[in-house]
Image (tube, rainbow, N blue to C red):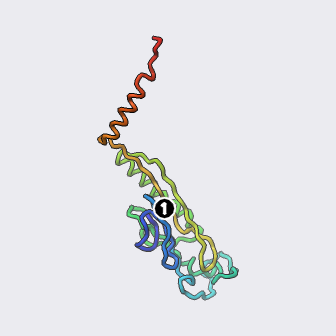
Amino acid sequence: MAFGISNDLSYGSWATPMQGAPYGAGAMGGAVAAQGIGAAAGAEGSGAIKNPGEDTAKQPGRVSSPAECETCKNRRYVDGSNESVSFKAPTNISPAAAPAAVRAHEQEHVSNAYKKAAQGNGEVLQASVKIKMSICNECGRSYIAGGETTTKIRYSNEENPYQKNRKESDAAGLRGMNVDAVA
């Protein structure tokens, strides 16, 4: 359930393959990753406004300002999991809309875990979502780099001999606990 841009992402992770190096790995869960293409990846900054409404001041040590950042303009999100969820194809999302889109995407993975547990006589013990942030190498703006969903599902197995022994042991300890000896 990974949301990333390349096919080599780990199952259950979001990654930001900035400069070709994916990061992040998760357990069973979902994730989304962002990829930027621009000056940080070798393109030249032209000085034109590519991100209207952003700051035009260039920070010291940065290639461009947030308004001129080619990487932020071209950042795409994609899911790398084997589940049927959103973002299967690389999709551009505005930096303002990315947090909500990523949270909604990760919630799809949580919903899928509850459906899977219900179908297999299981119980969801834990479901958590991490939203990952990063800093753009070109302009220095922080952005949502992806997310990771981790779920734990317990399935009861009545045919398992260990499970049967545990139930018998529990029953032996509980017998007679609610008996009224006065009557």
Quadrant in the rendering for residue 130? bottom right
Q: Residue at x 51, y 79 (%)?
A: 19
Residue 163 in the image: state x and y as whole percent.
Answer: 35, 40
Quadrant in the rendering for residue 179? top left
Instruction: Give 49 or 116, whichever is nearer the viewer.
Output: 116
**Furthest residue to the top?**
183
Residue 22 in the image: state x and y as whole percent.
Answer: 48, 73
At numbered mark 1, what does the secondary structure look like: helix, strand or loop?
Answer: helix
Q: Residue at x 62, y 71 (%)?
A: 142
Vertical position of residue 154 compared to residue 7: above or below = above
Instruction: Give 28 or 139, whichever is nearer the viewer.
Output: 28
Judging by the rendered image, the residue that carries numbered circle 1 is: 105
Vertical position of residue 60 compared to residue 31: above or below = below
Residue 111 in the image: state x and y as whole percent.
Answer: 44, 53
Check disc 1 and give the amino acid type.
His
Q: Residues within 10 Å of mark 1 (few under 14, many from 20)?
A: many
